[in-house]
């Protein structure tokens, strides 16, 4: 059954069309069974100047197909201002319930706080779904985000909303270059995308964490001290030869934990801002291991960056392949 929705018109442009509530017919199932699994393209769409992250709670957790169907039916507007990228992810337990055969083994939501030494806590604030919308300018992102909220209203409510924008090309709001050790776009799928032949193929695991910065305390440090905290030089991001064990890059060393693909973005206002940590991996373990090591759980050494930044949220989402998501939407 296809239910026609009143197309929400935001800024004059019809954005979303229909929600499909019918099971797969044979031809669509056959398309899926060809096992072509491609990741959602927005994950790798670099260079966009504006971002919004919307996290949703399902209105009825007993019927996850409603939320998944509504999200899979969202359409990206193409305008003269440039299009937008939509990346959609789901609480692992919700997706497992609905599509167990497309679920990476052992993947779990951020269901418990990460508890470090001396009461240090990274809070678990898991929600049911996430939309990451990115585009060339905030107006198209804004319109698309509003349209999405309207289109999903029957099945989900917004639990968290964050708007982000790049700062000085590729720096985060500590002033350091962020992403230096990221794999290149050619290499990134190897580390971020689940390979064909195993459950969840073409999908990826997203860790989304909003970190508030204590700008006053950070800016009160001399640059040489900031460089010790990060483990890299501020100007050109060259790694320090003698970086301290508590420096951020020592605590998240990818030679130790495996490579991940980060799409971090600054967020916030002049007086209240920080970093949206957006990390993708083909396996959950590198992400959880990095968090545990930052919290000092492995060897008692806590990441010094956590003295100046505080995690406000924490959630894992399974971001299914394009084909897997499309099965649930209106074509
Ligand atoms: C306030 C939050 C954060 C800020 C401002 C931040 C900033 C940075 C900066 C400036 C670098 C050095 C340049 C680079 O290679 O990108 C870096 C490296 C890195 N960060 Fe973060 N980061 C934050 C949180 C996290 C979290 C939560 C994780 C993991 C769960 C993480 C994982 C990494 C990794 C894997 C590297 C590269 C390490 C290597 O050299 O192999 N970061 N980060």
Image: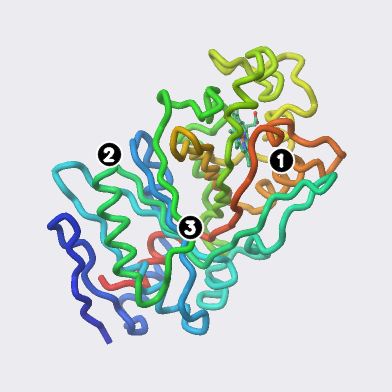
Q: Looking at mark 1, is its residue's CB closer than 8 Å to ligand 1?
A: yes
At x 23% / y 66%, what residue is drawn?
Answer: 16
Label 2 close to label 1 by CB (< 8 Å): no
Disc 2 element? loop
Q: Earlier in the sequence, mark 2 or mark 1?
A: 2
Q: Earlier in the sequence, mark 1 or mark 3?
A: 3
Q: Nearer the viewer, residue 143 or 23?
A: 143
Label 2 close to label 3 by CB (< 8 Å): no
Q: Is residue 183 above or below residue 70?
A: above
Residue 136's label in the rendered image is 2
**Residue 127 horizontal/vertical position (percent):** 54, 64
Residue lying at the far bottom of the rendered structure: 1
Q: Disc 1 or disc 3, which is closer to the eye?
A: 3
At x 18% / y 42%, what residue is drawn?
Answer: 81
Residue bearing the label numbered 1: 257
Which of the 4 image quarters holds residue 259? top right
Q: Crowding near pointer 1: few (<14 within 10 Å), some, many (20+)?
A: some
**Residue 109 horizontal/vertical position (percent):** 63, 63
**Residue 130 horizontal/vertical position (percent):** 46, 59
Q: CA distance from mark 2 to mark 1?
A: 34 Å
Residue bearing the label numbered 3: 160
Disc 1 element? helix
């Amino acid at each position: 059954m296809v239910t026609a929705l009143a197309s929400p018109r935001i800024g004059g442009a019809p954005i979303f069309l229909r929600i499909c509530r019918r099971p797969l017919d044979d031809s669509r199932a056959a398309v899926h069974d060809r096992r072509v699994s491609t990741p959602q393209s927005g994950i790798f769409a670099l260079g966009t100047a504006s971002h919004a992250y919307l996290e949703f709670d399902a209105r009825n957790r007993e019927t996850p197909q409603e939320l998944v169907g509504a999200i899979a039916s969202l359409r990206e507007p193409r305008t003269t201002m440039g299009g937008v990228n939509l990346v959609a992810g789901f609480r692992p337990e919700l997706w497992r319930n609905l599509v167990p055969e497309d679920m990476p083994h052992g993947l779990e939501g951020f269901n418990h706080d990460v508890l470090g030494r001396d009461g240090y806590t990274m809070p678990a604030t898991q929600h049911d779904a996430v939309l990451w919308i990115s585009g060339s300018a905030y107006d198209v992102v804004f319109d698309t985000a509003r349209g999405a909220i309207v289109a999903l209203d029957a099945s989900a409510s917004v639990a968290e909303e964050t708007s982000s924008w790049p700062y000085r090309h590729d720096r985060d709001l500590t002033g350091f270059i962020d992403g230096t050790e990221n794999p290149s776009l050619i290499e990134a799928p190897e580390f971020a995308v689940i390979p064909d032949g195993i459950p969840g193929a073409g999908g990826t695991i997203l860790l989304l964490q909003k970190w508030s910065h204590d700008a006053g305390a950070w800016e009160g440090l001399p640059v040489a001290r900031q460089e010790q905290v990060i483990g890299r030089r501020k100007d050109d991001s060259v790694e320090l030869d003698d970086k301290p064990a508590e420096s951020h890059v020592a605590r998240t060393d990818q030679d130790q934990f495996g490579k991940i693909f980060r799409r971090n973005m600054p967020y916030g206002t002049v007086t209240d801002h920080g970093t949206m940590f957006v990390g993708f991996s083909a396996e959950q373990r590198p992400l959880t291991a990095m968090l545990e090591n930052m919290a000092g759980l492995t060897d008692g050494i806590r990441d010094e960056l956590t003295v100046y930044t505080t995690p406000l949220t924490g959630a894992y989402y399974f971001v299914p392949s394009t084909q897997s998501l499309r099965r649930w939407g209106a074509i």
